Image: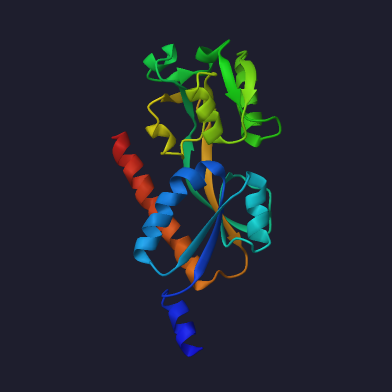
Amino acid sequence: MNQEVHAIRSLASGSVTVAAMGPYDNGLIPEVVAGFRQRYPDIAIRLESQPQDRVGEWVASRRADIGIVSLPIANGALSVQELVKMPALCVVPAGHALAAKETIRAEDLSDESFVSFPRGAPFRFETDMLFEKKGVERRMLTEATTHEAVCNLVAAGLGVSIVSPFSPHLRRNPRLEFRPFLPAMPITLGMVSGEDSLSVAAQAFHDFILEQTESYKASLAMAAR
């Protein structure tokens, strides 16, 4: 037993369950997990893909140690930490006329076929409000529930859309073009955990994410110069 306790405290043993939304568990988080495993090769990591509202439920019920979500999140029983905030991007099919623009504005999407998120999704509500305020009409004929699915539909030529900037793997798709979108729609990436103390392994993962976030912010600042 003493050996097992020592192994856990020295991070030579242990496990962490991470619940994350689709844009993060397919793109950003796997890269973080890979870096964490290099530092702590004996810690087991389980990554669970869950919708925004379920991530908080999983962490609150202790089915997950850490949750990665878009903020805000409606669960007062959780400890919430903002990681990084970035503006959403406009995605269009490669070769689309709008791809010639350095920046795409809401007015540029007037009468464009638009791949949207389902009604009731917070990001759908925010997007619809923006276009309504601008008086811009879009052709809303196609919907998908995840950012990745939206991008796949855009790549298939079914329209354009506004998506999360936190999915670097999607930007490697040669069938897609991403451009800054105005007016800016900031998306805040956050980390949630239970109010009770984390396990040694989960605390190490928590701290590693904070460390990687600072490096990520520094790289963004360098790119902006």
Instruction: Note whether 84 is above or below 5 in the view shown.
Output: above
- Residue 11 screen position, x and y as percent: 42, 74
What residue is shown at x 41% (from left), y 77% (from top)?
A: 10
> In terms of image quadrants, where is residue 178?
top left
- Compared with 105, 204 (above or below) is below
Residue lying furthest front: 156
- The residue furthest bottom is 2
| Quadrant containing the C terminus in the rendered view | top left
Residue 67, given in percent of the width and then of the height, sits at: 57, 54
Tally of numbered discs: 0
Residue appearing at x 48%, y 69% in the figure: 201
Q: Is residue 7 above or below residue 204?
A: below
Q: Is residue 95 above or below residue 49?
A: above
The answer, for residue 182, to whether it is visible in the render is no
Outermost right residue: 120
Protein image colouring: rainbow
Query: Is residue 22 in view?
Result: yes
Nearest the eye: 126 or 150: 150
* Quarter residue 195 falls in: bottom right
Residue 37 in picture, x, y percent from top left: 39, 62
Q: Is residue 111 left or right of residue 75?
A: left
**Residue 3: x %, y % from top left:** 45, 87
Q: Residue at x 58, y 44 (%)?
A: 71
Looking at the picture, tell me which residue is in the foreground, 1 or 139.
1
Q: Is residue 16 left or right of residue 60?
A: left
